[in-house]
Image (tube, rainbow, N blue to C red):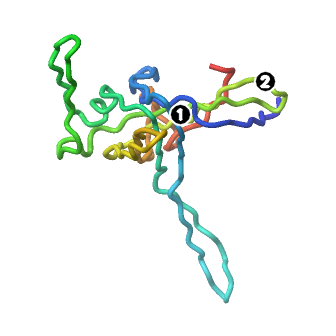
Amino acid sequence: MTAPIIEAFSISHAAILNGTTGADQADIYGVREGTVEIDSDSYSNTGDDSILSVWNWFNLATVTVTSGFLSYSMMSLITGATITSSGGVGSDFWNHPLWNQSSLNQPTRPVLLRCPSKDSAGNPRSLDIVLYKCQFQPIRFDGPSYKNGLSVSWTAQALMSTVDEKQTTLTDPAIGRLVSRPRV
């Protein structure tokens, strides 16, 4: 069997996984765009006026997902802060601390990014980018702007991990993996 060739489209689904079964724990609603960028570098070992070898390495990957919706439960999960409510039906209000000191450096969490894709034969598939250990930064806002509204950006650093999203020990530490599967 030859290895598949796939083509993927924009991120259609992003979620924090529960860390034990790999199931979605919190959805990042209304994904507008997303990126995964590796922080890498190299060193050229020189001698006799030429490059003799090159050493490559990476530190982490930066994941950014921009959404058109602000989920209070998602904010609570990544900040560790409690959501409060007036409880009054019809006139209720919701409250969540914004950018407070205790929200920094919360526990890492696995993240899933899903892209609709297809294989070289045109069969519909899903391409999942599973990141094992993500440390979230404070959320960022863009806007609100006319016709575009308010955008929320969720950014995390995906770090090297010795376990996958289900806490299974890896034989080779990794940041994550790619999974191509029939359309989900």
Report whether 179 appears left or right of 150: right
Q: Give the quadrant of the C terminus.
A: top right
Query: In what element is the residue under mark 2?
Result: loop
Q: Is residue 84 above or below residue 90?
A: below
Q: x%, y% of residue 25?
A: 39, 23
Residue at the image point whose x is 53% and y is 53% from the top: 38
The residue lying toward the viewer, choosing from 41 and 80, is 80
Q: Give the quadrant of the N terminus.
A: top right
The residue lying toward the viewer, choosing from 114 and 110, is 114
Residue at the image point whose x is 48% and y is 39% from the top: 147
Report whether 17 appears left or right of 3: left
Number of marks present in the image shown: 2
Q: x%, y% of residue 16?
A: 42, 30
Q: Which mark is residue 123?
A: 2
Binning the other alpha carbons within 10 Å of mark 2 as few (below 14), some (14 to 19) or many (20 upward) gives: few
Q: Amino acid at mark 1?
A: Leu
Query: In what element is the residue under mark 1?
Result: strand
**Residue hosting label 1:** 113
